[in-house]
Amino acid sequence: ESSETGLNTKCKRVEFSITFYISIIGFVLFYKQLATFPTIVTTNGGGAFFIPYCLSLIGIVIPAVYMEMTMGQLTGKGPIRIWEELSPVFKGLGYAKMLMLLFSCIQAAPSIAYAFYYLFWGLIPSGDTLPWNTCVNNWNNRTLCRTVITPCNPLEPYNASGTALPTLPAEACVNPGQTVTTPEYEYFMNNVLQFTPQFIYSGPVNQPLVACLAMVWGFSFLLVCTGFRVYRRATILVIIVAISLIFVLLGFSFAYDGTRMGHNYVSSPLYFRLRDINVWYLGFREAFYTYAISSGCFVYLGSRNKVFSMGSNIGPVVVSVVIASLYSVTCTYVVNGYLGIIASQQQQPVSSVATSGNKLMFITLPMMTRRAVTDTRLKLALSMFYSLYTVLGISTLAIMLETAVTAVVEDLPKIVHRFKIFFRILFHLIIFALGILTVRTGSLNLIDGMQKTSELVQPFLAVFQYFAFVFVFARCLVPEVYHNKLPPRNWSIGWLSISSFVLVCMLAALIYHSISFIPNLISTSDTFLLALSWTMFALAMLIILGTTTYKAIKHSNNIIRILTPSENLNIRVQEVENSKFSKKAVQYFSNTAGVTMETIIEQF
């Protein structure tokens, strides 16, 4: 699969080029663009938030993605073996990144399983009245549940007890200070999660959610069952479905009152919010997590690039980032439009219903179907939301897990490489088995803890990676290292400049992140959260330091070996010949290295 043999005709190279573009676009269409990004825009200046976000994309994301894809293509290796070519002293960084990538897979899968639950246990079997829109089910607390939240009028005696006569209990008024819940909240917490106070982090296994989780990883395996070949072709369908659904949802929203009210939160920029440094940090953070910078996925995708030369590698990066950004903006308008519909139904401001993450997808958006009895389009719209969420989520999880599988298999003896399909099956089964811990009653707190753990560790690994890139390309410029080696010197200088700029930006973000996030994490009274987050942080750091120490001891007689790029750090001529600039490229490389073209070809 990695060699992509058969690209010896123009038609096949064109087909690979198109599907390679689409595979990158399919990966960067992140499912959380639907669940978290719209609310962050709404609560941080509306349209003004796009200024720091777009600047982060142009100044940091595009250079970072280009660097990671180029290094993957340059070495032809995954996120672990890449460091054997660049600088073996940093190989532990690859192990730590794969550990966190698998950790992120376990943490992200349950929310996609929830969407399957809503589709197959809620929307499809239900009639006009959906189970999460009423307070008469066995999971409802009929004393607290309200379908309509109306403040009591103290001037009316029959309202003094909070009981609205002669209305239904679910429509009873609410006294000042009285705690009530919505049926959507009780459906998610009491029926889907089966949450009970005595099980804060663990409890009995939730069998329907286990079935949904199995569906998530089953579809993920089908996307990558034979590797990148299947994925880059299957992504065509993913892109078509995702774009079609989001525009149908956008069209549906204009038929209802309140849509314009929701859109105004986006189209009315609050520029004064840009004085807040936290808004700029959030713009960078959203760009960083949306595009999975330093996760290793772009290194994997770059290692599968068999058509584009490294000079033209910027094309797929720019196109994918631009399309994903436009998709993020569209998602923001769509979600805020439906929040406006919900706010209009409840006669509340949009800010009162603006939530993010699981709360948005599984508590707030289901409120729109309270009118499904008279308008089935809202039920169809919610079905499309969950279908879109699952399609994008599975596509992202598939490439994340395939990146980890490839990285591990490449680091094993070559004799096992032919059995990669069995490693894919094994990894999917292991991650599914570990994921069962996240679909037990009370597991929502565990998932939140895993999210905070990722937020603690990932920024440090990103800074370490770009420090390693700076170190490697600085070494490439040392005369004794550079002598008769590729890539050309001017490329090394360019890559050093890009890596240095990204490193400075990420270091500044890490400092602010450490000041704002870590003190809040330390001050929490949740001992399990503290133990989980700092254990994973310590484990990642120990892997990096332990591998570095092992390499230093192993090569103690020639320590410079683990600090110097491998002689294989070059562009394979066979790959360059596949590009339309092959002859010019080989001639340029031969002139730069001071050897003849025949000598270069003989070396390969």
Image: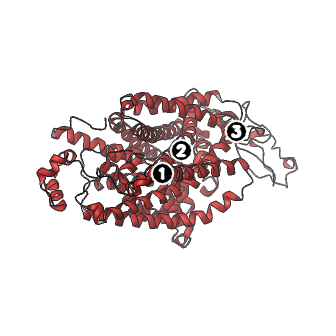
Q: Residues within 10 Å of mark 2 (few under 14, many from 20)?
A: some
Residue 51 seen in the figure:
no
First in sequence: mark 1 or mark 3?
3
Residue drawn 61% across the image and 48% down it: 345
Q: Quadrant of the C terminus?
A: top left
Q: Nearer the viewer, residue 249 or 162?
A: 249
Q: Nearer the viewer, residue 603 or 34?
A: 603
Type of the residue with mark 2: Ser
Give the residue at mark 2: 104
Give the percent coordinates (x, y) of residue 349. 62, 57
Q: Secondary structure at mark 3?
A: loop
Q: Residues within 10 Å of mark 1 (few under 14, many from 20)?
A: few
Q: Spatial distance from mark 3 to mark 2, Cα to Cα? A: 19 Å
Residue 543 seen in the figure:
yes
Residue drawn 23% across the image and 39% down it: 15
Type of the residue with mark 1: Ile
Give the percent coordinates (x, y) of residue 72. 34, 49
Query: Which is closer to the viewer, label 1 or label 3?
Result: 1
Q: Secondary structure at mark 2?
A: helix
- CB contact under 8 Å: marks 1 and 3: no
Above or below for 295 versus 372: below
Give the percent coordinates (x, y) of residue 121. 59, 29
Q: Spatial distance from mark 2 to mark 1, Cα to Cα? A: 32 Å
First in sequence: mark 2 or mark 1?
2
Give the residue at mark 3: 442
Query: Residue 553's mark?
Result: 1
Query: Residue 161's mark?
Result: none
Q: Give the image quarter of residue 232.
A: top left
Residue drawn 54% across the image and 29% down it: 214
- CB contact under 8 Å: marks 3 and 2: no
